[in-house]
Structures are given as structure tokens and as C-alpha cells.
């Protein structure tokens, strides 16, 4: 996987990128096709295809870095909000199968659209579903 992965190639400097943060575990780069100016993506230096492969230590460190980047974007652009989002699996919109987190500056009148339709639960259904999921959270 690593030798055909575009983000591994970016980490390995085989493909150039515009970097805004780097440490031992992560590299944060400008997204090549930004949803908004300043759209950044945080990449793990190690190849994990998605959140299911990620170890807990890297997962928790990633959110701390995403928070720092979100804060920097807010300060620099004085944006009205920031989306932190992360896709896992083709069905969820993932197109590069190397774990990454999007950090996207938002404005009240921007053209970024992150939407989904909303449904409702029948009586007792939410509790039943919560119970089924709960026993798998370890
Ligand atoms: P996903 O759809 O997997 O959540 O996000 C992948 C992101 O990677 C997309 O927003 C896409 O624009 C970005 N991307 C894909 N290839 C490259 C690249 O070569 N360089 C950079 N900087 N971003 C890329
Ligand atoms: Zn990779």
C-alpha cells in the first residue's frame, strides 16, 4: 500500500506539498483542491488506511494538532467557523486511503456544503440501537 499511496509519497517528499506544520508523527499540508482558502489536511507520517487502523496514541495526538491548526486558521483568517472532518471508506467519501483530517475555514456566506438529510427514530428505536452499539465500545 505505502509504495502506491500518494500521501506516503508526500511524507517521503517524492511528491511536493506545501507544509504548514510537521513533527515526528504528523505533517499538515495545504489541500491541493481546497474547499476554501486555507483548507489544510493533517496526515499521519505512518500509513494507516483509516481510523479503524489508527492506534490510540496517534488518534489522540492527531486531534491536538488539528485543534492547533484550527486555532491558527481562525486567528489568521478571522473566519466565522472551522470544520474538522475525516472520511473513512469510499462510501463515506474517502478518496485517499491514508488517514487524514480536513481542517476547513468557514464563513457565513461561503460556498462550502457539508450536508446530509435527517431522519427520525420510532419510539424506543434509538435506545435499542444505542444498547447494541454500547456493548462494542471497549
Ligand atoms: P478525502 O476525500 O480522502 O477525505 O480527502 C482527500 C483530500 O486529499 C482531497 O481533499 C484532495 O483534494 C486532497 N489531495 C489529493 N491528492 C493530493 C495531493 O497530491 N496533494 C495535496 N496537497 N492534496 C491532495
Ligand atoms: Zn500512505
Image (cartoon, rainbow, N blue to C red):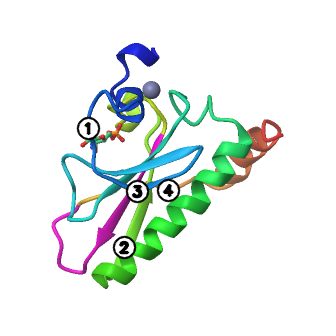
- Does the residue at mark 3 contact the one at mark 4 (Cβ under 8 Å)? yes
**Count of residue discs:** 4
Q: Secondary structure at mark 1?
A: loop
- Does the residue at mark 2 contact the one at mark 4 (Cβ under 8 Å)? no
Which residue is label 1 attached to?
A: 16
Above-or-below relation of 13 to 39: above
Q: Secondary structure at mark 3?
A: loop
Label 1 beta carbon less than 8 Å to ligand 1: no
- Does the residue at mark 2 contact the one at mark 3 (Cβ under 8 Å)? no
Discs 2/4, front: 2
Q: Residues within 10 Å of mark 1 (few under 14, many from 20)?
A: few
* Distance of label 2 from label 4 (alpha carbons): 35 Å
Discs 3/4, front: 3
Q: Earlier in the sequence, mark 1 or mark 3?
A: 1
Above-or-below relation of 132 to 112: above
x then y, percent, for residue 104: 33, 63
Label 3 beta carbon less than 8 Å to ligand 1: no
Which residue is label 3 attached to?
A: 118
Mark carried by residue 3: none
Q: Is residue 48 magenta?
A: no
Q: Earlier in the sequence, mark 1 or mark 4?
A: 1
Mark carried by residue 120: 4
x then y, percent, for residue 112: 22, 62
Where are the magenta residues, as a range? Answer: 100-112
Which residue is label 2 attached to?
A: 73
Q: Residue at x 44, y 69 (%)?
A: 70
Amino acid at each position: 500500500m505505502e509504495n502506491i499511496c500518494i500521501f506516503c509519497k508526500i511524507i517521503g517528499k517524492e511528491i511536493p506539498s506545501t507544509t504548514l506544520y510537521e513533527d515526528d508523527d504528523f505533517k499538515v499540508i495545504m489541500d491541493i483542491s481546497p474547499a476554501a482558502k486555507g483548507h489544510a489536511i493533517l496526515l499521519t507520517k505512518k500509513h494507516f488506511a483509516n481510523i479503524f487502523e489508527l492506534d490510540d496514541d496517534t488518534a489522540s495526538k492527531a486531534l491536538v494538532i488539528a485543534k492547533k491548526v484550527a486555532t491558527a486558521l481562525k486567528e489568521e483568517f478571522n473566519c466565522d467557523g472551522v470544520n474538522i472532518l475525516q472520511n473513512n471508506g469510499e462510501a463515506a467519501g474517502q478518496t485517499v486511503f491514508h488517514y487524514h483530517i480536513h481542517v476547513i475555514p468557514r464563513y457565513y456566506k461561503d460556498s462550502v456544503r457539508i450536508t446530509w438529510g435527517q431522519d427520525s427514530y420510532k419510539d424506543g428505536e434509538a435506545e435499542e440501537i444505542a444498547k447494541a452499539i454500547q456493548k462494542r465500545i471497549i
